[in-house]
Amino acid sequence: MTSILQAEPIGKVVVGVDTHKYVHTAVVVDVVGGAQGNLSVAADRGGYEQLAQWAAQFGQVLGFGVEGTGSYGAGLASHLRRHGHKVIEVNRPDRRVRRQRGKSDPIDAENAARAVLAGNAGTATATPKSAEGTVEMIRHTKIARDTAVKSRTQAVVTLKALIVTVPDELREHLQGLPKMTLIDRCAGLRPGTVTSVLASAKRSLRSLARRWLVLDEEIKDHDRLLGELTRQQAPELVEAFGIGADTAAEVLVVVGDNPERIRSQAAFAKLAGVCPVPASSGRTDRHRLNRGGHRHLNSALYRVVIVRMRFHQPTIDYVARRTSEGKTKKEIIRCLKRYLAREIYQMVKANPERVQAT
């Protein structure tokens, strides 16, 4: 459905887009904040082209503010970027705005456009990830790996829980075995025809054990590919102490294929939720751990810091010095995560040759 106010183009406009699985809704707003029209298009290549041509009728498009550039809006953002348009990632409106204006697709799209207009005030300035290179391959592989790891864990937990209730002669044969011995023995069970409780128990245990083995092979295959892709994208990061391919993959997925969108190491620290947060009062002058930022990236940095606190001599010496100064363990970890974020940023920041290659 299209609704256009009949008016001559005034020169420069911005477009806000509310994205959904099957339909995207766009609203054009001029530079003084006047809504010029709205359009709903199908969420496919034909719809993307139609939206871009429609927006151009109102004048020079300064930018597209798109909600959900990492999900339903990923295809639209990629199409617009390939055709030379500036795309800005827009968060959904806060609750106060929704209470005042209500909720509908055109209203959300108009709010996205107004957020772009207010970009100088920090309302919407983020550049979305391009999702067109090696990092996107890493993201796909990591999603498959992570779900396989969860399923493998669930399989072995269920297998051990089932052993508790199987017939005594089978339970006594399996209890107390190391994990791999237990899985191998269960995978080799021969239930025969299921005509008894013992046979059904053997069949179920064999199924769970074989599922674990299949998932384990799948995870190893994902790990091999992740190792190749992460070394191709950021070899220095993979070789850094305590990081490795899995943590490097987590970092790269958050950064994206266009790391130049993160303009400084301070911005990266804020994205990771490791920038210092003031927690001072009266004569107390201190900072605390940041509870914001990307929690998966924050967790990855935490794991690296814990490894370095145990095995990395410079970090061990730093912890001892800061402890003697009266810092708590939480405060020391906060400082180490901030230093680590600075180190990682130097490894993954925009490399013109690598960006061009991807």
Image (tube, rainbow, N blue to C red):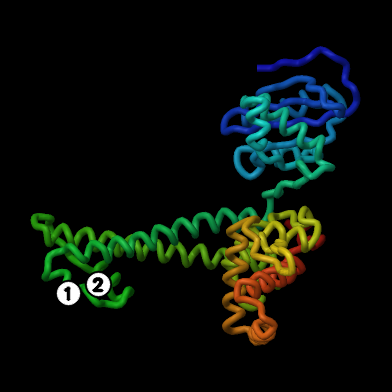
Residue with the most extreme right position: 11
Quadrant containing the N terminus in the rendered view: top right
Residue 139 position within the rendered picture, expressed as x and y whole percent measured from the top left: 59, 55
Describe the element under mark 2 as helix, strand or loop. Answer: helix
Instruction: Tell me which amino acid carries mark 2.
Output: Arg
- Image-based side of 193 in relation to 217, left or right: left
- Image-based side of 58 in relation to 103, left or right: right
Describe the element under mark 1 as helix, strand or loop. Answer: helix
Q: Crowding at label 2, few (<14), some or many (≥20) Cα neighbours within 10 Å?
A: some
Residue 57: assigned label = none
Q: Which residue is mark 2?
A: 185
Q: Disc 2 and disc 1: Cα gap in Å?
A: 10 Å
**Foreground disc of the pair 2, 1:** 1
Q: Residue at x 72, y 28 (%)?
A: 110
Look at the picture and state if 195 lies above or below 101: below
Q: Which residue is mark 1?
A: 173
Based on the displayed image, in which of its 4 quarters is residue 108 positioned?
top right
Look at the picture and state if 194 lies above or below 223: above
Quadrant containing the C terminus in the rendered view: bottom right
Residue 337 position within the rendered picture, expressed as x and y whole percent measured from the top left: 66, 70
Based on the displayed image, in which of its 4 quarters is residue 84 positioned?
top right
